[in-house]
Structures are given as C-alpha cells and as structure tokens.
Image (cartoon, grey):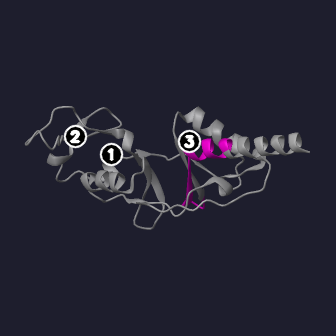
Amino acid sequence: MQITTKRASTKPFLKLTAADLMSVPIVTIPYDMLLRDAGRLLMQQAISGAPVVDANGNCVGVLSAADFIAPGEPRGDTSEKQTDISFVAPWGEIINLECSCGCVVRDYMTEGPVAVSPRALIGQIAETMIDAHIHRVLVAENNRSCGIVSSTDLMAAIAAAARKRSRRGAQREVS
C-alpha cells in the first residue's frame, strides 16, 4: 500500500494550495514499462492513476485505472472468480492484458497530462479538474511531478473545513 503524506494546514479553506493538498511521494510509471505491469502496479498500490515519466524523469503522460476493465466472464476455476483484465486505449481499442506481451505504456498513455503549480489555489484546482473532466491533477514544477491532487483530496479538504466550522459553532454555543 502506498504511504502518502499530507501537510497539515491552518490556512483558510479558499487559501489552500496544491502544495497543501497534494499527496507525496507519488508513484510514477516508466513510459517503457509493459502495460500489463503498469496495470498490476496501479492495482497493487490501490491508486486510480499515475503520471508516466520518460527516461529523464519528465512527465509525458498519465495512465488511469479507469482505462482498465475486467469483463464479467470468469475464466478457469469459477470458485476464484478470476477475470481477464483488459485495457481500453484512448482511441477505443480493447487489449487483453494477458495477451499483451509487447504493449508498452508510452503507446497507450494519455499524453499531455493536466498539471498545476504547487501555488495553485483550491478553487483553481477544482476548476481545472472540472474543465478537463478528470479526477486528479499533477502538481509539477519545471515539467517534474512533485505531487498529485485527487478529487478525494479536495473532498477531504472540504470535510476538514466543515469539521473546523462545526467545532467553532459548538464552542460558541458552550460560551
């Protein structure tokens, strides 16, 4: 399981930045990794996507678990309920990962990852995700990923702000 670090912040909610919200360290996928191995990595780390990096560590794309599907037809011993895992390429091609010997990530990733600066405010991050119809943005400087902010991170910030507001309200009632 991947360990992520969140920075505790005392900033007002709308002043939170990507640096305050991002998860670090992030799992990256080498662009020359086999697609099958990348799918396994995402499942093992229990993450829904990861940036794809070239040999120099520059972010060149993203691979999302949403691109992977498990058809409902079990194979082999039905007591184990194993299914073939497939990958849906950005152009719609469905690839069975068990038969994808030579398929490498760079040929199937989504190019041009959506990224924000570590200084991007929470509202800007949310707008970026909504406009791009995505559930995560990379936090990057100089084409290097330094973190990731997911829709879950945004929801956690909203929940924390609501708890903080509730506590303040409860303290006022006691006073």
Q: Earlier in the sequence, mark 1 or mark 2?
A: 2
Instruction: Give the number of the mark in front: 3 or 2.
Output: 3
Q: Work out which residue is located at the far front of the displayed protein and give it.
A: 174
Label 3: which secondary element: helix
Image coordinates of residue 58 in percent, x first then y, are 48, 62
Tell me which amino acid carries mark 2. Ile
Instruction: Give the number of the mark in front: 1 or 2.
Output: 2
Q: Identify the residue position indicated by label 2 in the image.
A: 95
Q: Identify the residue position indicated by label 3 in the image.
A: 151
Q: Which residues are magenta?
A: 141-159
Image coordinates of residue 48 in percent, x first then y, are 42, 46
Label 1: which secondary element: loop
Q: Identify the residue position indicated by label 1 in the image.
A: 108
In the picture shown, does residue 29 fall above or below 87? below
Tell me which amino acid carries mark 1. Tyr
The alpha-carbon separation of the residues under discs 1 and 2 comes to 10 Å
Report if residue 77 lies within the magenta region: no
Tell me which amino acid carries mark 3. Ser
Q: Residue at x 32, y 45 (%)?
A: 108
